Image (tube, coloured by chain):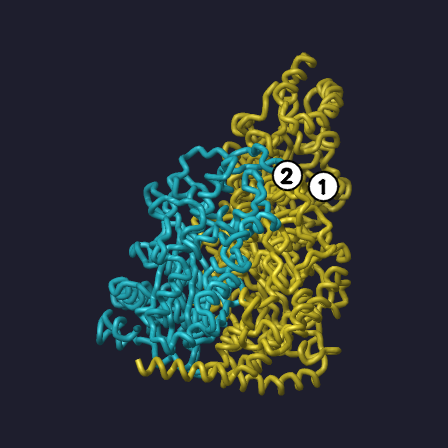
Chain colours: A yellow, B cyan
Amino acid sequence: MRATDDSMEATLRARRDSTPSRQSSSRRDRSNRKTRHAVQDDNPEPASEHHRRHNSLEQGAIVTEGGVRPPNFFAVREKLFSCSSLRRTNTTASNTTTATTTNMASAGGKWREEQILIICPGSRTTMAQLGCSELTPPTHRFPTRMFKDGDEWRPYYTYQRKRVVDGVEKEEWVEDVDEDEGATWPIQGGQIVNMDAFLAFLDHVHSMLTTTYHNTPIMLMASPQWTRPDCEAIAQYIFEKTRTPALCMINSAIATQYGLKFPNMTVVDIGYEKVDVTAIYDGRVVNHLDLGPPRFDDKISGGEVFTQKLMKLLEGKKFNRDMAEQLKKSPICEVLPYAPNAKSLVDLPKETGVAQPVAEPEKVVEVPESNDAPKPPAATNSTEAENGEQNGDDDGVLDVASIVTSGQTREFLAKKEKEKGKPGRKPKDKEGDAAPSKAPRLPNSKRTHNTFFYEEVVQEIVNPEPKEKPATNGSAEKPSEPVPAGQTTDGQPAPATAPAATTTGDAMDVDSKAAAPADAPATETAPEAAKPEAATESKPEGAVEPKTEGEAEPNPTAVAEPKPEAAAESIPESAAESKPEAQPEPAVPNDTPEYRPKRVRRDIDIGLERFTFAERSEIDRIVTTIYRTIQGVDDMYMRPACWDNLVFVGNGSRLRGLKENILQTLNARHLVSPSTATMFTSELPSNMATPTGTGSQTPTGSFTGAPHQLPSSGVNPLLQAATTASTLGVAAVGTPQPGSDAAGPTTTHHFHSQTPTSIKTVGLPTYLQEWTKNGFEESMFLGAQVAARIVFCLHSNMDLQSVEAQRLANLSRIDYNELGPKGIRTHSMLS
Amino acid sequence: MAQQPLSSAAQPTDIYGGDEVSALVLDPGYCNTRAGWAGEDVPKSILPSFYGHSTATPTQNFFGDERLIPRADFEIRNYMNKDSVVEDWDVAPKIWEHMLINRLQPDKQTPPSKNGLNDDPKEKTQDGEGDVAMEETENQEIEKLLQENPLLVTEAPWNTPKAREKTTEVIMETWGCPAFWLSRTPVLSAFAAGKATALVIDVGGANTSVAAIHDGMVLKRSIQKSPIGGLWLSSQIRSLWETSEPKVTLTPTYMVENKTPVDALAPVQARLRQFPYQIHSSFRAYEEERVLTEFKESVVEVWNKPGRLNSPGNEEFAKTLPGRVFEMPDGWNQMWREQRFKLTEGLFDETAGYPLPEEERVAKNQTIPALIRAALEAVDVDLRGNLLANVVVTGSTTLINGFNDRLQNELAAMYPGMKIKIHAAGLTSERRFGAWIGGSILASLGTFHQMWISRKEYEENGPGIVEKRCK
């Protein structure tokens, strides 16, 4: 009892004593925020005008802020520090920092932009790059996985195989860069599930990109799911096991914000197995909800959900994961727009010849009986008929759009069917060959069937002996190799071949390396398919003319001869290797046959599955989470800004139409429209805050918009803070004034208005061509680069506050030595 | 290079700042449960105390707002009761674990001893022993989920001794915490406001409490409690909608597929969602509460002009004040004027407000002024002046516009001539999480280290220690 009192008293005394220091440090903390933005302006990137304006307002706010909102925000943290012996630590820390700062300033350009290592880990793929002088898409992408080998971790799948060379049997270890078998994926749904593997992976990424730790500061992006001990463990590893001079950890949503440069945003990050929705106001995370992380949720969310659904729908066609993934990425797979009146909320394309209203998707779907290579073109007269009808269809298409929205689909279709009365085109014809010829006329979303060009890499056995090489490129006949042909047609390629086709960055390397041997198979399939699309193939192999092929014919042999030995030892990354399981009995007694990747294309006809895979329930789940995240932001005045600046990132959002559908659903379901009630009464709109005696909320001309709508820039709370706070003076420090102030300090404004009154996505920057090409789905990487520049490379024209802010944004080795791993809590950009 | 696991246990905390204990703070309430690291300014993990329970076999619980979506065989339950005391002791530890461990601690699915990394190849020769050792460590891992973190848990001032002991057992036996402390919410709220002596008025979700704090201790006789709070206000709103002309139907958001804008008071044009399964009434009630919350945020206000709402002339004046439009999830929209003041009037005047069913009606001694009067009358006369000069207002319901002005008016009328000073945090989060923030401050104080009830102390005295120490 006595002890309690004593401690309380001591505490309170400490707090009272510490008031001045609290004030100053609170100011410091705020300035941190400010300079993050201010600093951004020095950035070579053209900051948007809006952003600049925001900065100036914010600065204005901060100048006077010290006097007004003392007990809040950061003050709490300061209270904590000032109250205890922690203060000791704190003061020592700041003493040393002064020294540090001067060092840094004198060092002048401590780090150059080329030195900085940027790592953005994802559950599937990790983006990394050394240097941030050019704001380009990541130069490297690594699969985020490791392989356990005893008590060590290896970056690649490694196996031992036997090989007969010149009659001598040899054993050798082979690394297969594309193999996933037995891999540990240290991040699942954004959470680090295996820290050891993750740290080993970081080490691997680092060693792939640079050789030295001495002057390579690291910018590491952290998922919102990373816990505080996770971050501390990473910091500890980096500082104690490597010689990294400084580490900056940045929240992925904040990184996105730095990439796109809007002070207020809602970042919807659709990843591999999770969806993160983060509301950011004024550069700070104000709310966050997530779907899918394995420890929180019963069910994953994100891109993988759609792949799995596709697989399930196309089970009948023997789709494997790789096929489903490729189909999902292909242009024929899309999420159709939200159709508010349709029964299943989507307007699926209909067989125009059949008077069938929008039905349950599953019923419409008919699974073709075969999945072989596409049928040869049907009789030409049918094509003519098609063409004739196509025009009719074209006209119809426009009608369909309007008619469907008018909700009279049924009648219209019945009518049209009567009018036509033509001998029915068999759906067969349509799905078989007409698809390509129709392509230019009918958009994918209006077609019941479309052709999916599935490309896979099969391992072809090539006997090293030149004479037995079964190269038959010159002739346009079917390839004579039995093995690859068998693999392609049964739709079940060996598992080993699957990853090669999917990995983006690596696959290209593989292609170029194996280009010579792969040419042959690629062109073999092209004539076989007999499609005009073959010319449009973007793959380099497909473009190669058969003629040159004939000339190059001996080449593969020549290359192949030295390869078996060389590849195994010196070029382990070459995709020429494959798994031993696939190795058949050696046909030739002398040498083991060599495997070589071969690109095979198959055309598969896909019905409505390519639309119906986008389950309504999954989209609803995301929509609801977005709604709850923003509506759950504590302060109401922040919500309109968050609603007006939605951004979808994460490669899961690359799925065609998904973003649009989510946005349409949000608008149809949650948008609050201007009410006629206010118009009749010609009164103040309901979004006016209640006037408090200060007059600060007296209506101004800024309320010119529609009633119920909050002009986003009209009453900036920060501006108001700046204008009203100065009148109160510094007397208010520590204890708020009674009276009108009893309702809380005047700087907080209650915007009592329902949201959302508008839902918009942000405009994406256009000045970064590389990124426009790449897509801004990975803009968190861009943001990490921008942040890295600001944190590590900015040294001139900085005032004391900026220097301090910079110091608090990253954990340097000096600070680490002082604070230990927990320094990452305060010296980071994690929240 | 060999990758040595870096368990957080190995952190050389003794080298870097010996005071660092990484304490956790848990603040359970009826509407929300807050958890986070001591020393931070907001709780990192805020979950509704409502959780989803799937009655399908096997039964399953869903924690977190993202998870509370329409499902088959799905009920919404709450592990707390409306007195803010834990009711369901089967679920409480689970939801707390979900927050303290799943959300705040790294994944320990593969502790270093189990993941095979540290298996010494030599050990495998002595087969049997190695296995036994591994099983032991495994058990330890499960038992000692929080063995590195002291834990501070908040409780309502009227928490029962039984519930306190139960909490203690969960903390010490189930989680293996090295130390713990139970603290009453009003003390912590006062602490968050930087006061050791204060009159704390906490208008929360399920109830309102008034308590006098002196030198960091609750004065037990002063504790007053009433069911008026967020939920009571919700029933006021329901009553308003029931009685208003035309009657307002409450269609919760989850039922609306999409809506078309309509004129004020015009019939709704919305497409409702169809579910192939039955939606449980508890789910609907929970969802309705969301709409009511939005209504409270954007429409409801407290009469803060001089006098009460039913003082002569005031009601007429209220009718001339600008109204607020509220659009329901299904598109129904209507202007609300004097009603929005009347809704909250019952907080201060039991005769005002909208008619409620008998059991929800507020007695004369349950309004906020009555609670304050009763609390002050229970304390020494000498203390009253000091308490009135340090009134701390906390709880989400106090965020309703005008509340503090009104409270100021009421207090001034009740205690003329006394110095009355209201302290209410300006930040929404500080008002909502006042008790948690106070706990965060307390648990991170260097001077508090001697206060923790340690494992040793617990083992010597048993769960009864909490009654002796945490007064």
Residue that badge 1 annotates? A537
The Cα atoms of the two marked residues, 1 and 2, are separated by 10 Å
Q: Are marks 1 and 2 in contact (CB under 8 Å)?
A: yes
- Residue B88 sits above or below residue A520 on the image: below
Residue A153 appears in the figure: no
Identify the image quadrant of residue A263. Answer: bottom right
Determine which of the numbered discs, if any, sits on residue A601 in the image. Answer: 2
Q: Quadrant of the N terminus of chain A?
A: bottom left
Q: Is residue A41 left or right of residue A596?
A: right
Q: Who's the residue at 53% across and 77% down the image?
A: A78
Q: Position of residue A55 (x, y in %)?
A: 71, 66
Where is A721 relative to A96, above or below?
Answer: above
> Is disc 2 placed on a helix, strand or loop?
strand
Q: Residue at x 59, y 41 (%)?
A: A665
Looking at the rendered structure, the secondary structure element under dot 1 is: loop
Q: Nearer the viewer, residue B356 or B193?
A: B356
> A367 or B96, which lies in front?
B96
Residue placed most toward the observer, A628 or A709: A709
- Residue A372 placement (x, y as % from top left): 58, 31
User: What amino acid does circle 1 point to?
Assistant: Glu
* Residue type at numbered disc 2: Arg
Residue A129 position within the rendered picture, expressed as x and y whole percent measured from the top left: 65, 64
Q: Chain of mark 2?
A: A
